[in-house]
Amino acid sequence: MFEDILLIIGGPQGSGLETSTLVLTRAFAENGYNVLADREYYSNIKGKHSYTHMRVSVREINSLAYPVDLMVAMDAETVFTHFSDISKGGYFIVDKNIVNNDISKIVSMEPLVRERIIRKLMEHGITGENVNSIIDYLEGQGVCVIKLNYLKYLKHLAKKYKISLSAVSRYLSAIAIGAVAGLIGVDRETVFNGIRTILAGKEEIIKHNIEIINLVAEEIQNQVGIPLKLTKAQPKHDEVLVVTGNDIIAMGKIVGGLRVQTYYPITPAADESFYIESKQLLKAGNDIIGGIVILQTEDEIAAIASAIGSALAGARTATATSGPGFSLMVEGLGWAGITETPVVVTYYQRGGPSTGMPTRGAQSDLLFAIFSGHGEFAKIVLASGDHLEAFYDSIEALNLAEKYQLPVIHLIDKFLANSTATVPLPDFSKIHIDRGLIAEKTSDYRRFNKKKLVSPRAFLGSNTIMWYTGSEHDEDGHTVEDPINRLEMYEKRIRKIEAADKEIPVEKRAILFGHKGSKVLLVGWGSVKGPILDAVSSLKSQDISYLHVKMFSPFPKDFVKELLEESDLLVAVEHSYEAQIAKLITMNTGIDIPHSIVKYTGRPIYQNEIIHAIDQILSKKTKKVVLSYGE
Amino acid sequence: MICEQCKHYIPYDFYPYIGFCSLENKITFYDTECCCNFEPKVVEEIIEQQERVYCMTCKTWIYREDIDKHRSHKICINVVEDEVVHEESYAGD
């Protein structure tokens, strides 16, 4: 029996992989297992290769790894793309109708990918270029290849029921689900519960799906039994959420009192706004007690401007975007800075620069986020390392923005945004809403009152007069150029970061996993947390700790400096070329981080890659390890 | 002869082994034995009747002026696109 299973389901984007992922994740979660699933897809959205890489475990899991124990190929491209990702003794499900498909005929495959795979076939000693050649190779490697007749299931359904041809993806996804359910021996009823939830309201399709799942699972079990049966789970929590990063950040914002979200659609941020929109009517029981305004604007410049406008009117406001969108927002951010307007920008990083790789991840915008905007103005920049952190951080971002009356940038990356995970329910006792200093009605109101670092804030539309301008201004908000006023206003704004530095507890800014003075200290942020924690856990005999940095402005320099000074070997880990966190640390502490593990292919960092990279650094083979595994 | 060879067979784009008979208005499969209404696919005839056709080999629509590049490919008069694909795809831009 297994405690941990890794699997891949691959096929053309839009052909049912999302449904398969959601149904299986829910089924495993209902059985008490922990699940993490990442979706990788091309930016053309429909038709090109995509896959779900999933891990199911009785243990807490933070990352994915290779090789996988099970692969389900919905098309020939998956076979060619992932044949070398499966372990010896693993299981490979393939459609017998495609076994003669040749790699040269796969039009959705990029020419460079095709050339690389053909070279890989040769390196593995595979002489043919069709699916059958791969099958022969895998069987020689001890992989159990199960050829199912996908067409047979569709014919069975078509004969028995009136099926919808324009929704065949619904039936194809059931084949993948049935295959996984059969091999792992998941309680079938929990799988059906997943189907009923995901396809709620579509009773006929649910019935068809259940029939296919049963047919496929039974056929597989008749052939090979249940070879990948998981150990019975001992769940720690009675209830869990099954959510993507986008979902849980949206939930955090809603719980955190968001009232206005502005956005221009951009991958991978837009799904967050769509989720908020689906919940925009706030209900207590059956009563609608409030609402959230979701405003899709004509571009990101309008998105930040609208967000600022709504914040000035007193609404708790955020916007969400990615690199290209944030680039457009930067001037608006400066306006928010000089007018001390609280606004949150949820910044989902993706491969850049420019359009870059819209559906691939990166962490290459850290320095851009921190130093964005001309002129100097205070902003808080924080990042989340996993789904639960992202929930709390999205609330904290709103609180910090309103407490200090400044822009807050909440950095996420595509890996976190698009991965689905089982997440324990947040602890609501830890949540509070802080609206900062709100002005009481006064006849002598001065919006930028210099007597306080953070002046009491009145809202536009209240019975209080104030002025806002992007120019330097006096306490009322009128444009002035007096040099002493400039000095005082400048310091008033900038010193908020010093106040935040003193007041925000260090545990919200950096966390040490391990102990002080360890031989090796890995330093990272964002979603590298997961693979690093899993790698360090499996390397227990080596003295390795991980410093997870959560806040970059204000930077927790004293805490970080002390830890760095006590370790022998410092290694920065990041999805970028330069390991920007290392540069930021040097800037703030004077300490150089000479080693790095970096990845900039746009694919996630895997647990096994970190383990191998640490080994390379410890054996002094290299100072910089560049990772590149994964399609 | 099988349905796939008939000009009335409209395949499903992700999985062309299942399709639709535009004449009989029903679901069929690529390897179903053809019926009495079978009409072989003749590319010239099809392209004369409609300005564009779907190339299953290249997974794209092609127009009359491009037909020469696709003569040896699997051409069909139309393709069934999945109407729930938006539920399966993340926003992309």
Image (spheres, coloured by chain):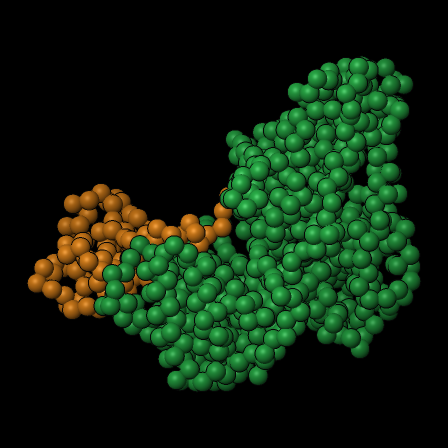
The answer to whether one can see residue A136 in this image is no
> Residue A392 in the image: x percent, y percent?
70, 50
Q: Nearer the viewer, residue B46 or A469?
A: A469
The C terminus of chain A - image quarter: bottom right
> Residue A517 in the image: x percent, y percent?
90, 66
In the rendered image, the vertical position of residue A271 relative to residue A76, given as above or below: above
What is chain B's hue in the picture?
Answer: orange
In the rendered image, the vertical position of residue A244 relative to residue A439, given as above or below: below
Q: Nearer the viewer, residue A371 or A295?
A: A295
Q: Nearer the viewer, residue A585 or A545?
A: A545
Q: Nearer the viewer, residue A421 or A491?
A: A421
Q: Determine the residue located farthest toward the left in the rendered image.
A: B36
The residue lying at 45 percent from left, 58 percent from top is A198
What is chain A's hue in the picture?
Answer: green
The N terminus of chain A - image quarter: bottom right
> Residue A105 in the image: x percent, y percent?
36, 63
The residue lying at 57 percent from left, 74 percent from top is A5
Name the side, left or right, on which A111 lies relative to A215: right
Name the side, left or right, on which A49 lies relative to A622: left
Write down the quadrant of residue B58 in the picture.
bottom left
The residue lying at 65 percent from left, 66 percent from top is A237
